[in-house]
Each structure stands twice: as structure tokens, then as C-alpha cells.
Image (cartoon, rainbow, N blue to C red):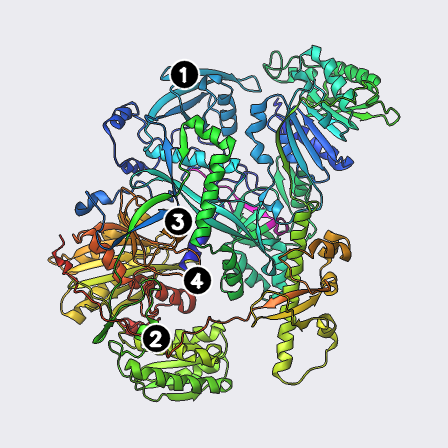
Amino acid sequence: MASRARGRARGRARGLEPSAPGAQPREPAPQVAVVVGRGRQQTGQVTRSEEDKAVSEISAGFQHVQIGVRGGRRRDVFDAGINTRQTIEHVKSSKCGTSGLTINLSANYFRVLSRPKWVLYQYHVDFKPPMESIRLRSALLYQHEALGPVRCFDGGMLFLPIKLHNKVTELCSRTNHGEDVQIIVTLTNELPPTSPVCIQFYNIIFKRILRVLSFQQIGRHHYNPKDPLNIPQHRLTVWPGYTSAILQYESSIMLCTDVSHKVLRSETVLDFMGNLRQKCGPRSFTDTCSRELIGLVVLTKYNNKTYRIDDIAWDQTPCNTFKRGEAEVSFKNYYKNQYGLDIADNNQVLLVSHVKKAAPGLTPLGPALLIPELCYLTGLTDKMRTDYTIMKDLSMHTKLTPEQRSGRLLGFSTAINKNETVQAELENWGLKFDKQLLNLSGRVLPPETIFQGPRSYSYNPRTADWAKEMRGLPVMGSPPLENWLLLYTRQNNREAESLLEALYKVSGPLKITLQRPIIIEYEDHQESLLRTLQKNVRNETQMVVVILSSSRKDKYDSVKKYLCVECPTPSQCALARTLSRPQALMTIATKIVLQMACKIGGELWCVEIPLKQLMVVGIDCYHDSASGKRSIGALVASLNQSLSRWYSKVKLQTRGQEIMSELKMAFVGALKDYYKFNQCFPSRIILYRDGVGDGQLDSVVKFEVPQIIQSIKSMGENYMPKLSVIVVKKHVSCRLFEHSQGTLINPPPGTVVDNEVTRPEWYDFYIVSQAVRFGSVSPTHYNVVYDTSGLKPDHMQRLTYKLCHLYYNWQGIIAVPAPCQYAHKLAYLVGENLHKEPHMDLDNLLFYL
Amino acid sequence: MNPLFKPSLHTQRHNFVIDFIRKTNPKKVADLGCGECSLLQKLRFHRQIELLVGVDLNVAKLKKRTHRLAPLSTDYLQPPSNQLCLQLYQGSVTQKDDRVRGFDLITCIELIEHLPINDLDQFSKVVFGYMAPQTVIISTPNSEFNPLFPGMLGFRHTDHKFEWTRMEFQSWSQNVCLVFGYMAEFTGVGKAPPGQEDHIGFCTQIGVFHKLETTNRDGQIHGDNAEVNFPYKLIYCVTYPSLCDNNILRKMLISELLYWAANLTKEWQEKWEAEHEDNTPVENDAEGGCKYREISWTKAQELECHPLHRHVSVPLDLLWNCCPKLNEMSGSLTNLIQLITHDPKIKMNSLHSAVVVCIQEQGDEDPNDLMDSWYAEPCHVEEKNWETDG
């Protein structure tokens, strides 16, 4: 679910939208062409040769000049220029591991090649008198042949592949109104191919290329609307496209590109609203409509811009007017006259989009009003995401095998290399893209041995799960379940009986002691269920199992709210439907009994952890849309040597507070509980931080790490454990393919890559830990941003991989370290169902599984 | 006084053309001297136009903004029924090109004043004599307005070869009309300040030339129909998605059919299951009964499908009645059947009278066999202690 929240943030309308009716006219652009940008960019330079240094002399005085006169503050989604590796002494020379067998891989990267001794010339352009309009500025500048035919100008900064004769070139132009304008072009920089400004420049050029290839930009990615896939039963259209970014990677500058799909609805927002009204009735229509639409991104029939729906103007219709120039114009007439678009429904309400991100110094634009009839929804609504059939039908179209995926990527490369206009553009700048996918080598870590009490076993390294192996083996340990309740409704009498029978059957070999429960029938509505709980759950109740007749959220919420917040008792819900199929019952019962054991403090299995006095911590966030968009942070920390018991705490963000300052308290609580379990504080803390969005790395390094260190200090002056902080990212564009008998397949679980596709300024690596049955596997990115552990990179990688084995809700290896997944699960439960912090009595139990 | 106009003069000229197009509904429109195609960019929204052509001498200008002329993303989502083809040519208005003949409307917005005065005759011959469209719109600066621009000397733009008074423009126009059989009306945009409208006139003067019906002289003046003239160079050409493209039409029809078939099946199945669960076969009631009566389970052996999947047959007639869009798009049921029958995306019964929908039951994959468990041999090598690191 965290991914959904991220997806939304990405979908925000980009840039300024001057043509949006209803928006106030744009203020004049700032007259100062030099924007002092993010200074930290400068520290991002990695390897500066002597030659570069000589070049930089020229640029004295323009150190901070950045591209970006147009867009103002642009969020740096690539987290460039955050150089954490230099702060970690023991990885300065090498951050590579050593264990495992070498494996030949390909990855979705193409090298960017430039001519030897390639230099990009950066000029600063001044207009006298100053010109407001960027369009006019570039029109005036483009008249001059002296600059050569090849240029890239963003309104303030000019890039040329050539060096002009003089450092300062003065040109004269005349506007259509006969005004004479002096243009002063000053050479400010000679940029080597690896300079950060150059990297930004490549990305600008690449965007041009995508435009030539007729790709449409939606959000950050580019799509091809000409060749859509239709999923008619859900009125969905899927556009194939690509994500792309050119960056300095470990040893070269590369284009990283991945296949991406944009889901659109092939009906207008008005159609959507109509259907919704029909389904939910007029009474709850406004609420439902707001809930489903707000936050979604629309495309319009009259331009290629995207707008995020921020509100619905229930009191406006297309007949309302807005000020255009001197006159008041109705929306209806405006669209008719400008775009020949007839608006059929005069009673529809309007959509409001707050056009954001005005450059600094500009007054922000007012809200834009949009006509539902002229807008199409992009992306999925929350409701559709939970619809099993929609997601299944979608994944049939969008899940690509490694072979299909690499085929598409190579097709993209061919399109770039075959198109004459593109080639001419690249030739002009002296640039080229490699035609083949990047080849690199990785290592496959050996499979772990799973210990379950006295027994140990290994697993099939390709499928990476041990559901079969663990059957019939006693678990590590589980408290006997002596006092528990089983709740069911009359109509699910049969399911309750068969569940109970199955539970007895499977719990025996697992050595989970299960006494007969107190069996209670409840009436099938929420109030009655709650009353039954209030009446029957006592202090000594260890566990409540509830069989629900349907997946209605209110009943589930009410069980969880009561038993997590008010009356702290582990609980287990099961859907009657899943219990009704006899052929699956044993599998389901095994899962349920294992879950129940974990929830009361049972331990299922472990792997060998060759570090003593270790505490592993996982943090994840959930962005709650229901309760006023506040974030929820969860922290889960290990309490024992075998990493089988965990401390779990959730904090709801209070207004204006960073989530970490709340989690500081939770972290201190974890240390205290660790002390209770072990009679000592951990001497090593390894913290995995998940839920960091693109562009937020900076704030983790600058604010969160110091806060963690501060919390540790608060335990006592002499307490100085070794600390590692690792940022975990599951949604990355890196894809790895293994060569196998002439085709490409998913690399096996345990594949580690710490060269080529990593970043030189980071101590980072990729691990493929999970196995997928369909589509291409996505490696998880680990970025060690702080590390005083002195742990060898090889051990850091192996420990991380080991931790992916320890999630008790899945008898196999998962994509992230177990504490991250626990934290995710916990944050999700609180964000989705509880909306409150759970009772502290549950802190040491995995009650949220 | 402030001679700046609101909206800008440029916009007012374009709005004049747009208004004219909305009144007269031309199908083939060309803009001569289209520059960076700003007018074309607006005209393409007016889908009564089927062919939209831009001509300019300056190829760099033409190419600069071509990406803005590409169809919008959303044009692909619900393609309209009207076709539109947009073409850009590099060429001179003093050259004859067959591809710009027989148009309904040709616009020359702020063009003629850039031509050397000697070329004007050739321009009239080409535009009025050879291209001979139904209507020509010519706009040019009115030099009588110039004194209202403070401090302006000479022409409004450095590239202007001349700027005419109303009198000069109108007499040139009348002459053109006489030679080529047109009738001109004069108007303009950019009003002079109140009180001066009459003796100064509009800032931009516009002549609208209508071809006289009686004169059908095209081809006769020059008699050069036999040879083919293609001196213009095609720079850009794009066909907008529309239902005139049979592939698009088929795709849209199939999407619509499958959507309704899935919808009806779902409703019908819910009803069917409710009836069969209670074991009381309810007689079809008035409301739902008629609608779903014709839907039925089908064997559909010829389909390559999972043997456990069930199939439902939804008659085309029913779909046709449910969805008026099908009629709008295809015109007739026969036409519809002809268009869709051999498309692999849609499954039909052997008589081609019903759409077959495959129902896949929701459920997990085969559960693992519980009895089949095996234990790997313990193969564990003791891990070295990592504490020695650092």
C-alpha cells in the first residue's frame, strides 16, 4: 500500500499550467536568470581529474549555476549529489562483497558514449532590456546564426557543442514591435561528460528524443498512445511506455530504462461519476465521489497536460464564467470556441486542481477548474486496486517475462538508433547510446540453512520457499494455547467445525499445543459481533479467532479496533469462503495455526546469525488518506539473538512533525525492551529504513540519522553501539536478467550486484532475494547511508539476505528484510483499520500478522 | 494611448479564422505562410476539417513545433468519427503544387506584406488562379493605423516589404477578383480608439474572397492539368485517430461489445446463482426477465479454453439494443458482424449471432499436496564469526 501512496505523489500535475482556464494569469518570470540552486549538487562530483580541475577554473563565480530557470524548485528524484560513501571509512576503496558463485547478468542499462575529449560549453545569456517571456527570449536568440545550428536553451542557460570565439559575445535583435534588444552570451563553464550539469543536460536531450519518437509524457514517464492495449471488460486502456533516467553509475554514465505501463480509463470522468451515482445512490454520492476521485490524475481532451484532482466544486457548472482577458466567458463557450468541443451536460459539477509548484518569486496560480466531461482518469482508483479480477486482468497484460521485457527494451534502443532525426540530434551533440543491454556480473549467495528447533533443512534455491519442508516438523517454540475463543455465525457453523478439526490435525506435528476453545455463536452484524467480544474476552483470553461471513470491512475493523486498542488480545480473522473448500483446507489451517502461534509469541524458525548482541530494526511508513493525510510510521526491532522475537511500535504523525521525531520514542522503547530480554543493551544496531520516496534520501541523511544517534546517546554517556543505517527501496527501475541457454530468465534468489549499476557516491548494492512465478523479478536496492559497524560489505550483504528469510507470515524468502515487512504490515493495519495506536501490552507480539 | 490589444492582435486574427470556419464548415483548409504552425495548432481541434495543410518557405520554423501538431494522448481514447489528416509542406506561395488545389478555404495571415511586390502577381495567379479555393482569407497590416503606435517609424516588422492603406489593399483585391472570378468583403481586427474607427480602420485589415459559382475556370486558364506539379516538399504528415480507420473502428466496437457482454453476463450470473441457490426456480419476473432471457450457458467446444471454465452466450441483438454506441459507430448490425467476426479478440458462436464470454472462477491455484513432504539433508557449514570485522 505504501507503493500506492508513492504512486500518487508521482502523479501530481507538473510544471505551470498557463492555459488552464480559471487559473490566474501567470506572473512575470523572475528577471534574474541565475538561480542559485541546490548547492549540494557540487559535492556530488565524484572523480575529478586534473583536466576537470583546470576547466573548473573558468567557472569561478558560477559554481552554483544550475539548469532550471524554468521549473524553479525541481525535486531531485534521483537523489543525486548525496555523497554518503565518503563518510564510511571502510568502503572507500571497495564496497564489493566476495561470497557466492559468479553469475552472468544483463541489466536494463545502455551506456551513453561521448567522443573522446568531449566538452559541453555552457553559456549564460543576458537580455538588455530584460525579456519576460521565455518564448520571446529563445525566439530572439535563435535568430542568430553565429551560435551555430545546434543549441539547447532553457531561457537562461545556453548549451552549445562549440566554443564561441570570444568569452563574451554580444548580439543584437529586434522584436516585432521594433524594440532593439541586446543579447550578451557569456561562456561560464566547460563541462566534462561526467559533470552533474552535463548529466542534467543529457536528460533534457533525451526528453527531446522521446518527443521526436512521439512519446507522450505523463508524470515522469513517457508513453506511446498509438499502440494501446484494451481491457474492455473494465473500460481500461493500457499504454506501453518507458521510464528513463541518465545518471552517473559506478563506472560510466548510463541510460537506465524500464518498461512501464500507464493505465487509463477509456471513459470520461463524467461517465465515471454517472456510474458511481447509479451504484451508490444519490445520498452517499458526494462522499463516495470525493473519496474515489480526489488525488487521481486526469488528462484532458484539449491538451496533453495532467492535472491532479484536489477537490470537487459542487457549486459550479460549465455555465459558470471565468475572466478571460477583459471579458467574462462561460466554460461552455470557451471550450466550444477554442477547441470546438461541445459540452453536453450543463449540470455537471467541476473538478478543482491546485496548480502547484510556481517557481520561487512567482505568486502561486489559483485553482484550475476542469470539466469532467472533458477529462479522462489515469491510473487506478483505490477501489479498483482491491478488485481481484481487475488486477488479474491487468497483470495478464502488464507482467512481462524477462525475455519479453528485454525484447521491449531492445526495441526501444533500436527505435533510438534507427530514427534519423534522433541520430542527427545525437550526432550534433557528439553523443551516442550503446545498442546492447549492459552486461555485468553478480554473485549468487549460498542458500541458508533453516533451523527449526533441533532440526535443520535447506530449501530449493530456485523457488525459495520451505512450506513443504517445514510440515511435520516442530516449530522452534510456541506457548501452549489454552484459553481461546472461536466466534462464528450460524450460517458458518460447518466452516467453524471443519476449521477446528483441521487446526487440531495440523498443530500436532508442529508441536503447537492447542486446547479446546470456547465456541461462541454471534449474530451476523457488526454491533452484535462487538457485543459478543465485549462480553466474552477476558484478561486470561490468549487468542480470539473470528470467522467472518463476508469480507465486509466494518466487521473486520471492529474486531481489530476492539482487540488491538481497547482490550489488547491477539486475534485471528478467517473468511468463511476460504474455509469452505475442502481441498485447500489443510494448507489454510496450517497457515492459520502458524499465524496464531506467532501472534501469541511463538517462534517458528531461524537462520544462523554470526553476530552477537545484535539488534535489527525495520522502519516503514504508511500514508493514511482517510484521517487527514497524516503518515503512520512503524518501527520493529529484534529482541533476541535468534531474531525470532520482535518489539513493534506504531506512531501516528502529529501535524507538522517529522515521522522520525515520533519514532525516536519508539526506538528508545525498543532499546529498553531489548535490555529487559537480554540484561544488556545491543552492541550493534542495524537499522533498515523502508518507505523513503524518491528525492527524500537527503532528509534521511540530514535529519533522521542524527535523531537516531541522539536517541542512542540518551541511553547513557558510555553507551556507544556500532550503528548502520540502510535505506531499503523495493520500487526501483533496475532489472536484472540471467543468461541461460540462449534466453534471459530471472536471476535466482540470492543474486547480489554491487558493481556497474550501483552509484559511485553511495555504499549500495542490489539483492534479488525473492522468487517470482510470473513476470520479471525486481531487485531490492540497499543503500548504507551510515555505518560505524566496520562490517565487511560481504557480511553486510549476507546479513541482509539472511534477514529476508525471517518473515513468519511467509514460509520462504521475501523481497525485503523481515523487520521492514513487519513494519509495513503493522503500519498498514493501523492506517487501514485501526487509525489509532495499538495498546502497549501488544508491543512484544507479532499481533498484526 | 496604449495600442496593445486584448486579446492580442495575433489571437484576434486567429479567432477570426476560427469563427469563419465554425460558420462555414470547410473540409479542406490550407494555411499559407504558416510559420510555427500556431494557427494550425488551433484549427486541428475543429473536426469539421478533414484535411489541414500548412505551407511555409522556412523549413526550420516548420519543424520547430511539429510535435505540437501530433494528436493528443486523449485523441486515442475515444476517437471521433471525423477523419483528420494534417500535412506540412515546405514551399513557396509563388509555386503551383497540385496538392493544394480544390480546397474549401485558404488563409494567408500576415503573409503578403512579406512578399516582394513583384511577386504579388505570381501569388495571385497561384492562389486564386491555380489553387482556386472556395474562399481565401488574406490579412495584412493597415498602414493608416501605424501613427497610433508611439514612436514607430517605417514598417511594423523589419521583414515587411510594404504596408498598405485600406484603399491600396482594396483596390488590389478588386483587381484580383476581376481577373479570377472572386468577390471580396473587407473587415479587420484590432479596433481603433472610439471615434477614430472610421477614418483609421482596423489595425489588421482582412479581405475575405468568395469564389463566384458561375466561373468554373480552374484548369482552363492554364490548361496544365496533364502534367503533375509537386514542387512542395512534404515535411510532416499525421493522420489523427478516427473511426474512419477500420482498425480503430474494429477495436472500439470490440471494446464496447466486450464491455457490455461482461456487464450483462455478470448481472445475469448473479441472478442465475441466486435462483439456483434457493432451489426455487423463480419465473422470470417482468423487470429482469426479458432483459436476460436470451443469455444462456453454452458448451462452446470449439473454443481453446480451460475445460473447467464455463461459457456464457450473449446474443448480439441484446447487446445492440443495450448499447446505442454500437449503432452510432457501425451503422448496421450486418456491418458490425462483418467488422468483428474474424477478430481473435472476440469469441462468437458458430452462427455469429452471439458473443461468448468465458467465466473464470476466482480461486487459488492448486493447493500443494499436503502428503508430499520431503526433507533436505542437513547440509550446514558453520558460519565463521563476523565479529572480527572492523
Numbered disc 1: secondary structure: strand
Quarter occupied by residue A426: top left
Q: In 3D space, how far apart are the residues under numbered discs 4 and 3 (Cα atoms)?
A: 31 Å
Where is mark 3, residue-wise?
Answer: A733
The residue located at (60%, 11%) in the rendering is B153
- Of the residues under marks 1 and 4, which one precedes in the sequence? 1
Q: Nearer the viewer, mark 1 or mark 2?
A: 2
Magenta range is A354-375
Q: In 3D space, how far apart are the residues under numbered discs 1 and 2 (Cα atoms)?
A: 74 Å
As shown in the figure, which amino acid type bears the numbered disc 3?
Answer: Ser
Estimate the x, y position of residue A741 in percent, counting from the top left. 38, 52
To the question of a shared chain for discs 1 and 4, the answer is yes
Numbered disc 3: secondary structure: loop
- Of the residues under marks 4 and 2, which one precedes in the sequence? 2
Q: Residues within 10 Å of mark 1 (few under 14, many from 20)?
A: some
As shown in the figure, which amino acid type bears the numbered disc 1?
Answer: Thr
